[in-house]
Amino acid sequence: MEAYSMRDVQALLGIPRTVVTAMIAAGVIAPRRGTRHEYRFSFQDIVLLRTAQSLRESRIPTRHITRSLRRLQGLGEGRPPTGLRVTAVGGDVTVHDRQGRWHVDTGQFVLDLDAAGSDEAAGSGAVVDLRRPRKQAPPDDPVTWFDHAVSLEPTDPAGAVAAYQRAVTAAPDYLDAWMNLGCLLCEQGRFDEAVTRYRVALEHLPTQPMLHFNLGVALEDAGARREALASYHACIDLAPDFADAHYNAARLHEELGDPHRAIRHYNQYRKLEPVV
């Protein structure tokens, strides 16, 4: 069976590493590990990642994509989403099968308002939105600002960043808002800004291992490997069973010339995530 490296995947699909790791963390794909414990992706993984990338190009947020693909894997007695036609309609993830086109998250069917029923119309089904316009979020309501930010991500990423910032300003301990804000900045290639936001978040939530882990990823993307390593160790101190933190720490120790500590973390990773 042919296997692809992370570099192969990025070269083939033009997909950011943050999106690939989000798909792995969500359980949408489960690549094997190579002899040096690097990710090795199957052809089915490539197909799923290509689907994710096409949805991203339709301005669907990464978290929405991973949630929808994960939900789709649980439908139809485990039928994999690689066997379905998955597209974006109206900012939502939809599936086209023998019964028609329907929204993954709600199960509702999408109406095709083109009477001609052409292939082009079938690929761009119309959605009748009967919801009332969203009211302006009050400045002191972090949950409303969070929801508003999520709704803005597909069409106005800059506005989404501002809305997430309003949410965490109103509620500095709002973990989900900090996580979404940092991930969104990383998706836009704004790694230094993501690092700054994660560090502010940790001033309010110092015992959240995911914040330390995501800070490590952002630091790596920004080219600060030693600082990233310190963040992965901070994550491990709080959550010793955080397998991906052990793996990333091992990889960085190896790259930075400390093979003994690398082996120690690789061994711990193998205990937590045995290679099959």
Image (tube, rainbow, N blue to C red):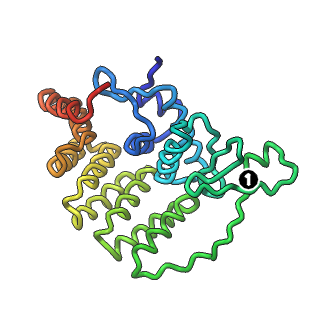
Place of residue 253 in the rendered image (x, y in percent of width and height, measured from the top left)? 19, 33
- Provide the residue designation for mark 1: 125
Question: Considering the image in quadrants, where does the C terminus appear?
Answer: top left
Q: Residue at x 50, y 70 (%)?
A: 148
Q: In this view, does 6 lie to the left or right of 46?
A: left
SS for callout 1: loop
Q: Quadrant of residue 32?
A: top left
Please, what is the three-letter code of the amino acid marked with disc 1?
Gly
Residue 79 coordinates in the image, percent (x, y): 55, 37
**Mark 1 neighbour class, 10 Å CA radius: few under 14, some 14 to 19, many 20 or more:** many
Q: Which residue is drawn at 45% across and 70% down?
A: 163
Does 189 sit above or below residue 201?
above
x then y, percent, for residue 18: 41, 44
At horizontal 47% and vertical 18% (from top left) the residue drawn is: 2
Residue 132 higher or lower than 39, as above or below: below
Measured from the top left, where is residue 69 in percent x and y?
Answer: 51, 45
State which quadrant residue 268 falls in. Answer: top left
